[in-house]
Image: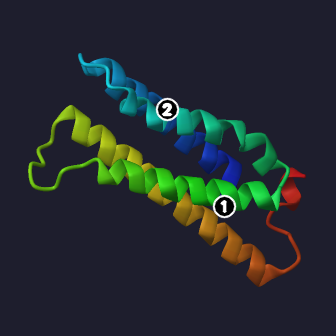
Amino acid sequence: MVHPYIINTINALVLLVAGLIGYFANPAKPPTALIAPLFGLLLLACTYHLRRHNRFVFNTVTALTLLVGLLVVWRIDPGAFSWSRRNILLVLMGLSCFVAAGFYVGTFIRERRLRNNTIFKDDL
């Protein structure tokens, strides 16, 4: 099983790298293109606390990941969709966020079913 802090690190790096590629590839350099990399840095900063199993941080990271996924997907125009670099990066970032949120919820459900916190015993 993959632990939430590993999924969070991968998702944050995807947001950071893909967001910076999208920002520097656009000659206009719009400041809204830096939203995803900033959230990537924020999620990366929460990795330490996820490793320590802080419940508040775990719930906050899940909510932020869903929020970023929705923000990224809303930037795609479905009427004029083409497989351009911008849209591929947006789809990649949105898919990464939704998959990460699915892993977070799955881990939470599995931990609740066991009720003895054995999921995280190997990394404490």
Could you tell me the amino acid type at mark 2? Pro
Which residue shows up at 70% across the image and 76% down it?
Answer: 110
Q: Which mark is residue 10?
A: none
Question: In this orientation, which residue lies closer to the viewer: 6 or 32?
Answer: 32
Image coordinates for residue 118, horizontal then vertical, percent:
85, 69
Would residue 84 be found to the left or right of residue 7 on screen? left
Tell me the quadrant of the picture where the N terminus can be found: bottom right
Which residue shows up at 40% across the image and 45% down it?
Answer: 93
Provide the secondary structure element on which disc 1 rests: loop
Image coordinates for residue 59, horizontal then vertical, percent:
69, 62
Which residue is the site of mark 1? 1
Image coordinates for residue 2, horizontal then vertical, percent:
65, 56
Which residue shows up at 41% across the image and 25% down it?
Answer: 20
Which residue is the site of mark 2? 37
Would residue 7 be found to the left or right of residue 3 on screen? left
Image coordinates for residue 8, horizontal then vertical, percent:
62, 47
Q: Residues within 10 Å of mark 1 (few under 14, many from 20)?
A: few
Q: Given the current orientation, which residue lies at the most extreme bottom position? A: 113
Provide the secondary structure element on which disc 2 rests: helix
For marks 2 and 1, the one nearer the N-term is: 1
Q: Residues within 10 Å of mark 2 (few under 14, many from 20)?
A: many
Could you tell me the amino acid type at mark 1? Met
In terms of image quadrants, where is residue 70? bottom left
In terms of image quadrants, where is residue 26? top left
Q: Nearer the viewer, mark 2 or mark 1?
A: 2
Q: Count up the numbered dots.
A: 2
Q: Is residue 84 above or below residue 29?
A: below
Which residue shows up at 80% across the image and 61% down it?
Answer: 55
